[in-house]
Image (cartoon, helix red, strand yellow):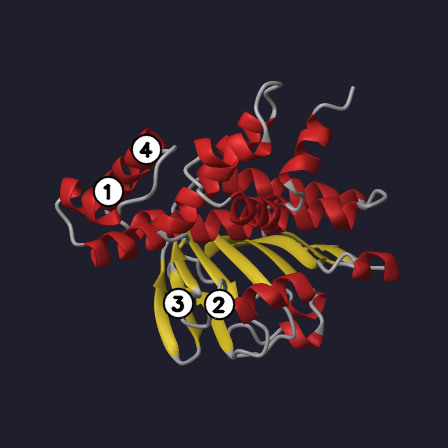
Amino acid sequence: MAQNNGGTGNSYLHYLPYSEEDEKLGMLCTTAGSTDVPPGAVYPPQKDKHPALFRTVAEGRVLPEFQIVYILRGEGIFTSGGVTYPVKPGAMLLILPGLRHCYRPLIETGWQEYWVGFKGRYFSGLLEEGRLSPERVFFETGFHESILSLFNQIFDEVRTQQPLYQMKACACILCLVAEMLTRERRREQPNYYQKIVGKTKYLMEANIYGAINLSSISEQLGVSTSRLNEIFKTYTSMTPYQYYIHIKIHKAEDLLGQEDISVKEAAYKMGFDDQYYFSRLFKHKTGVSPSDWRKFIKQP
């Protein structure tokens, strides 16, 4: 269902159908739209254009799906899980399924919002893994052309509903989630973290053929080993050791592409005394054995 909310500028809304084929994707776009609410207006405008479940947004509701709401103009309030946040332009609100929430603009300012609703096992998995969390539902993201562009791409897809529009819309939704989470993390973490992580990566690359020595790296950076581990994992979602193994295996892939080097030689060159351990680790990281990797990359 698509409606134009007369009297509110360029506002519009879509509640979307989806097929069994769409459901198999594991991601579904359920609704998308824009509302431009002038000062003094009732919120949401023209409630009867929304399904009953969605109408009580200003008083409080529980939805069976996710939503992201992006505020472009005006101010208001957002309450989720019993916590109330003051909303200003550039805020992103994350609505989680089953979590009671409400939001509305201030009567003095009104506001303009973009929103998209979505569901599916992929997004539920993000919630189960803790990548999405009831403790992180309000994001002071700010204005970014990349975010506006993603919303506009979603709006274009749901307006026309061309074949496989659900897949394209969901790809944009996933990018929206990534923008929301990464911008928040980068805003929270000081430049000090970036410098520590960057220097650690440099020292690892410089010693790519040896063995990792976190004590030596920590000493050069002037932090404790435990603090280095904490900073590195917070910034990259990997421990220093996990990252070091990743770049060693990536380098080993390059070595195995050379005509004059064997798997055993590649293992030793990368600092592995045990060729069989190297082979197991290589297969775990790449999905294929070193010998099969060589055959693959040498195919005509």
Q: Amino acid at mark 1?
A: Ile
Spatial CA span between label 1 and label 3 = 37 Å
Quarter of the figure that contains the C terminus: top right
Q: Is residue 191 left or right of residue 33?
A: left
- The residue carrying pointer 2 sits among few (fewer than 14), some (14 to 19) or many (20 or more) residues within 10 Å by Cα, namely few
Element type where label 4 sits in the image: loop
The picture places residue 271, in percent across and down from the top left corner, at 41, 38
Q: Nearer the viewer, residue 204 or 77?
A: 204
Q: Which badge, 1 or 3, is on the more N-terminal residue?
A: 3
Q: Which badge, 1 or 2, is on the more N-terminal residue?
A: 2
Element type where label 2 sits in the image: loop
Label number found at residue 207: 4
Residue annotated with mark 1: 196
Q: Nearer the viewer, residue 2 or 47?
A: 2
Q: Which badge, 2 or 3, is on the more N-terminal residue?
A: 3
* Label 4 vs label 2, nearer the camera: 4
Q: Residue at x 24, y 42 (%)?
A: 196
Label number found at residue 77: 3
Element type where label 3 sits in the image: strand
Spatial CA span between label 2 and label 3 = 25 Å
Q: Is residue 13 left or right of residue 130?
A: right
Q: Residue at x 54, y 26 (%)?
A: 255
Label number found at residue 130: 2
- 17 is higher (above) or lower (below) than 154: below
- 236 is higher (above) or lower (below) than 149: below
Q: Do we see residue 91 in this rendering? A: yes
* Label 1 vs label 2, nearer the camera: 1
Please tell me in which quadrant of the rendered image residue 30 appears. bottom right
- 294 is higher (above) or lower (below) than 175: above
The picture places residue 86, in percent across and down from the top left corner, at 34, 64
